């Protein structure tokens, strides 16, 4: 964990989390130009000091395994 990501817009709340926290790039479309924009953004982000720690902290907060377990247990009971 700790790497910036590229994701299409409107993917659950993940697109919002990534955009608001500047931890990746959210594609508006799947065009060549948009992919080039994503590459440029990721290239900028990987140069940011402490980015891995920030991404990890956000991932742990947003995707806590215990919270997910509780949700799945409530669905599949």
Image (tube, helix red, strand yellow):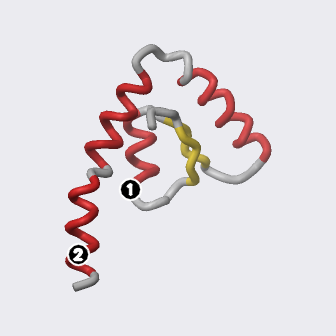
Pinpoint residue 57: horizontal percent, then vertical percent. Answer: 30, 34
Name which quarter of the figure residue 42 lies in.
Answer: top right
Label annotation for residue 35: none
Name which quarter of the figure residue 33 lies in.
Answer: top right
Residue visible at 66% across and 53% down in the picture: 29
Residue visible at 67% across and 27% down in the picture: 40
- Label 2, label 1: how many angstroms apart (C-alpha)? 21 Å
Is residue 71 or residue 7 the one in the foreground?
71
Pinpoint residue 58: horizontal percent, then vertical percent. Answer: 32, 38
- Residue tagged by mark 2? 73
Residue visible at 63% across and 24% down in the picture: 43
Pinpoint residue 71: horizontal percent, then vertical percent. Answer: 24, 69
Is residue 67 or residue 22 the one in the foreground?
67
Q: Residues within 10 Å of mark 2 (few under 14, many from 20)?
A: few
Residue visible at 60% across and 29% down in the picture: 41
- Residue tagged by mark 1? 13
Describe residue 74's horizontal placement relative to residue 23 as left or right.
Answer: left
Tell me the SS state at disc 1. loop
In the displayed structure, would residue 61 be above or below residue 70? Answer: above
In the displayed structure, would residue 65 be above or below residue 48? Answer: below
In the displayed structure, would residue 10 be above or below residue 3? Answer: below
Query: In terms of sequence position, does the residue under pointer 2 or pointer 1 come before the other?
Result: 1
Is residue 26 or residue 43 the one in the foreground?
43
In the displayed structure, would residue 31 be above or below residue 77? Answer: above
How many discs appear?
A: 2
Q: Locate the C terminus and report the quarter of the image it occupies.
A: bottom left
- Whether the residues at callouts 2 and 1 have beta carbons within 8 Å, the answer is no
């Amino acid at each position: 964990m700790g790497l910036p990501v590229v994701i299409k817009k409107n993917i659950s709340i993940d697109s919002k989390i990534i955009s608001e926290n500047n931890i990746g790039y959210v594609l508006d479309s799947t065009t060549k130009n948009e992919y080039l924009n994503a590459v440029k953004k990721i290239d900028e982000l990987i140069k940011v000091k402490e980015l891995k720690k920030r991404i990890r902290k956000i991932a742990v907060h947003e995707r806590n395994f215990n919270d997910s377990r509780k949700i799945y247990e409530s669905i599949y009971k």
